[in-house]
Structures are given as structure tokens and as C-alpha cells.
Amino acid sequence: MAVSEPAEAPDDAASTVPGRGRDHAVELGNRHRYINRHLSWLDFDTRVLELAEDTSRVLLERAKFLAISSSNLDEFFQVRVGGLIEQRRAGVAALSPDGMTVEEQLSEIQRRAIDLMARQMRAFRAIVERLGEVGLRFSNYGSLDHGDRSHVDAVFEERIFPVLTPLAVDPAHPFPYISDLSLNLAVVVGAPRGSEQRIARVKVPPLLPRFVVMPDGERFVPVEQVIAAHLDRLFPGMRVIGQYPFRVTRNADPALEEEEAEDLRTAVQEYLRRRRRSPQVVRLEIDDTMTEEVKELLMRELELSGEDVYTVAGPLDLSGLWGLYELNRPDLKERLPAPVIPPALAKPPSDDGEVDIFRVIDEGDILVHHPYESFESSVEAFIDQAVSDPDVLAIKQTLYRTSGPDSPIVRSLIRAAESGKQVVALVELTARFDEEANITWAAELEKAGVHVVYGVVGLKTHAKATLVVRRTGSGIRRYCHMGTGNYNSKTARLYEDIGLLSADAELGEDLTDLFNYLTGYSRQRQYRRLLVAPVTLRSGIVELIRTQTHSKGRIIIKCNHLIDPEVIEALYAASCAGARIDLIVRSSCGVRPGVAGMSENIWVRSLVGRYLEHSRIYHFGDDRWYIGSADLMGRNLDGRIETVTPVIDPRLQARLAEVVEVLLADDVLASELKADGSWHKVPTIRGLDAQEELHRLAVERTAQ
């Protein structure tokens, strides 16, 4: 296909793609060779926010993207800013790869975060205004009429008041611990006739909805306003002088001390305890009504400086808009198209029997593309058949994030173990923010007889792999699933991912070696098909780039993050040699494209749409195609177990070529990165939405 053909003249070839024209390469000047990873991530969250600002989208979808942008920013402070503050406290003097000090990064993050939060609030007000026009009104408690107030008062008494706990702050009551991302009220109270004032803290429990919805299902009131209107119930006999909402964000990534624990599960449980009680606050959010006295009290007690305080002109925690998205207003939501059954796994029209997935795989590898093609009828069906097939002897699988104990895959593994099959589940306990859930269902797997292991000390297992060992008439045969996404049926409807089902003998041997490495004491360093981090992936990717470091070279990389300096330098060298390079990077990108003498043959774009672009696709030259779990970051290449597998079948290579061709032709969802580090929407000329087009192509294949 055309996407695999080397470009004779990169500039001319690039100009055929929307947004790809380039009159001349930009001089580097005093700009650094790389773009800062943290600032690039904030740019990604801005692109998410742009979907909330897009007036062509239906309203509750805009509210959803605003909620996602808000929660993304929360996690950014928990992890990225928390890590930088740890570096500052430790006195780290080293510069980031892009030449910034820790202090410079924190200062620029603060500036951009303030701008981003202001945009979020403007988007919120615009969405609220439009919601009012279609019957969904954001209401203040003070504006409710008598009947509505009676309803809200009843909700407070029955559902809210019983779970509130006011905590006094005075010499006898030290300042309470404020939990991460909790919404709180700082309440100033005084005696009825005295002048002395005291401070109390009221936490809004996370079990409460962010907004109280009125009986008509059309109006909603912020829960903190409902609590504020009833503070006399919490402080009877006292005079309520003022109340001010606030929220803190804590470092959510304290060090995991594996060496100090007897086993990894114990270490992770201790890690979670420390994270819940993390002493380090990295952000204080307040609204613009808070007095200077209360603000200074909070800063003093939380050990913060003015740069850590973010003032919001509106309600805090817009991630609570997910609650509005649950309203029964299908007219205000986008209806997701139903995934299709992959043609290779569909029943023939005249066949009433079940599809034998193993027989189909025996006939040739199968590529599945979620969510356009069904996860249930491919990956889940593959594992389910392995459970019920009496010839299957063993099932081995990595589990990073699932949909929990009710996951069909987890239930299948339990059934397999109970039926006497050898079942191994490699559970990654340290999957960030899923640790507690993973511990819970890992214990459930163990109770059922599944051999649960937690991987290699010091390395997260991020690989997405399943190995099924099956007895056949000619001996033992291995069946494999290699994927780019988690074994999670819920996110498989929302994340774009690719999977490969194969009975390739060398791939099966590689997976056997990999699982032996993960479960035992193997020191396997060489693999036949797979590129495996941290042993062969980095060197393998760099070498593949070098094979294209010439005037007819062709490289396409689709990933979530590309910030590793060694990989970037290899791409720069290929560009200088004349190779044409297209990078489709969803989130953080450290590559600075279009710079004369460095990267004039590199184009970078990002797609943000209804689905989270999550697959990783690597293409080199005419016929080298790979998919895998790894992004091009130091943590993935050196600090995790990752797998990247070749796609060898020409039919499936053509499928991957079709996918990237569509992504490179998109002029609806795509933004392009410029040499100065700024992102700009690709001009809409053809009106091609890649996600809509890929679904159309999936449907078209089922009709062939």
C-alpha cells in the first residue's frame, strides 16, 4: 500500500496529507532539541479540553470531556508535579533532557496550569449556559423556590447529614489530615455573642454525588452548596460566619520499597497506606470567595507557598460532571456504534454451530481492532474456548488492569483452574491507581487455584499477552494473543487497541520463555520474534530506525508517549539522512519536528476523539510492522516488562497500513506539532474523521 512506499521527495509527498505542507524547515535557534515531557502532557490535556469547547459536539459529550480534562489534570499534579517537588526537596540539580531545571519546570507548569484551569472554567460556564437552553439547569441553592428547597432539605437530612463529620481546629484539636482530592469546606464559626472566631473543617465524603439532581431530572445543585446551606445543623448554637470550599492534591507516587517487605503484595499494601497518608500536598484549590485569613491558615497548616495555591472562579472538581453524564438524556449524548464481529470469527450464515477459534487461528493469524471489532467475540471468546476445551492443558496470562472480579476474563480463569487446568495469572499489583483492586481480585484468583505471581522485582509487567497450550493430534501447539491494550471489557469499548491471535511456533516459544522469566528464575536474553523490555526492546527499536537511516527510508510510529532521548536522536539521524518519518503521538512528545539540519523530514500529529487512541504501531521500510504494549519512554524501555511483536502476514500488514493511512489522512480530530512546540488543529478540508472511517471500514469488511 502507498503508506509503505518510500518518498522520493519527502516535502512533496507530505503535502498530500491535510496539514502536512511545509514551505521550509524551521531553524532551531536557541530552542532545545527536545520538548519538555511535562509541558507536552499539559498540551495533550488542552487538546482534550478542546473537545469540551467544541460547540459542534452534543452537550453531555462536552461535559464528559471537561470531566476527563479535569481528572487528567488531577493525576498530572498527583504524579508529575509530585515527582518534581520530590526532586526539588532532594536538591536534584540535574537538568531535564530539554535543558530545564526543576524550578523552571515547576514555574512553567504553574503558569500553564493556571491558564488551563481558567479555560476549563470558561468551558464549564459555556456548557452550563447551553444546558439551560435544553432544560438542564445549573442551580444555586439560594435561587431555589420553596418547594425545591424542601426537596433539597429532605435530601440533606436523609442522605447527606448522617455521613458528615465536622472537625474543629483549635489547641485541643490539631489541624486534621486532608485526604487526597477530597472536597472540603473551611467553616468559620463564632459564639452567638462573642467576637472570637474558630475554624472547622467539613469533608464532603466521596460517596456523595458531586451534584444533587432535582426530582425533575433537569436541575442540579453543587453538593457543597447544599451542605453550606445547612451548617446550622452541624454547628448548633454557633454563629456561622463564613464557609469556603477547598481541595488538596497530594503526591500519589511515593517510593515503593520492595526490599523492605517479605513479598510484593505486602510492599504494595504498605505503599497504598503511605499514599493515602502522604504528607506532601502539591496543590491547594480554593474558590474566589475565600478570605485571605482562611487561605493563609490553610497554607500554613498544609506547609504550602503561594505558588501552590490555585484560585478557581467557580465550582471545584469538575470531574464530578461524570454524574451529569449519567442523566437519562440520550438526545444529549453521542451514540457509540456497535462493534462488529471480526469476519474470520463470524459464523457462516448457514452454520448454527459455534466458531472453533483454534481452527480459525490454525488457518492463519487474525488481527482484531477494538473498539471497531468486538472484544467479546474475539479475545474473550478465545479465552472462554480455552477454558471449555478439554485439550487445553494450560493458560498463562498477564493482567495489568481489568474490569475487576466481575471481568469475564477473570471469571474464565477461575473456571479453568477449578476444572483442573494449569492456570497462571501474572498480576501487576503496582498498576497506578488500580493497586487495591488488583490485590483484591488476585486473592480471589488464588482461592480458586490459579497460580498468581507478581512478576519481577523492580519491573512493572505492562506486557499484554496470553499463552494457551493445547494438545493436538500432532502434539502440543501454542496459541497466543498479543495486544496493545488491557484485558478489560469496559475500556475495550472506549479505548482504541489492536490484538494479534496467532499459532506461530516461534512466537509461542517466545511467550513460553517470557512466562518462565516472569514466574521463575529464567535469565532469558534472546527472543525469536518478540522485542522484550528491558532486554531487547530499546536496542531493537533503535536498530530498526537505523535500517531506515537513508534517503529512501520510511518510518511510521503510533504511540501514546515518545520522549526517550536515545530514540529521538535516532529519529533525528534518520531525518537528516532523508528518511520520511510520520509520528502519531497521542500525549507526550519530546520530538521537535521541522527543524533545519535536524528534523525537517519529521511530521508529528495527535488524534483526540471519542475513543482514546491507545494502540502502538511501529512500521519500518516496506514490510516491517510491529504492534505492542510499549511507548517510547525510559520507564517502558528500561523499567518495565514490555512486548512488541512483529506482524508478518502480508494480509495483516495491509490492515495496519490501512489504519495508519486513515490516521494520517484525518483532518477532523488531528492536531499537528510545530517546531516551536505549539500544537495546531489540522485544517479541515476533506472532513475525514479517522475513528468514524475506521468503523465504516470494519463494517464494510463484514459484508465482504
Image: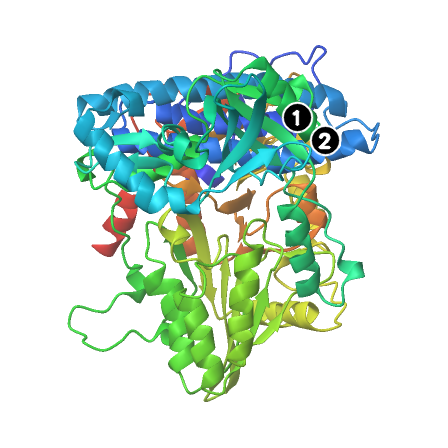
| Residue 252 found in image quarter | top right
The tally of labels here is 2
Gap between marks 1 and 2 measured at Cα: 16 Å
**12 left or right, relative to 552:** left
> Please, what secondary structure does the residue beneath circle 2 have?
helix
Q: Residue 614, how many percent across, how many down?
A: 47, 44
Judge whether residue 693 can be spotted in this image: no
Q: Which residue is mark 2?
A: 85
Q: Quadrant of the N terminus?
A: top left
Q: Quadrant of the C terminus?
A: bottom left
What residue is drawn where x is 62% and y is 47%?
276
Q: Are marks 1 and 2 in contact (CB under 8 Å)?
A: no
**55 left or right, relative to 305:** left
Q: Is residue 698 above or below residue 306?
A: below
Which is closer to the viewer, label 1 or label 2? 2
Q: Residue 366, how many percent across, how many down?
A: 40, 62
Q: Amino acid at mark 1?
A: Asn
Q: Which residue is mark 1?
A: 36
What residue is drawn where x is 59% and y is 67%?
426
Asked whether 205 or 395 is in front, the reply is 205
**464 left or right, relative to 533:** left
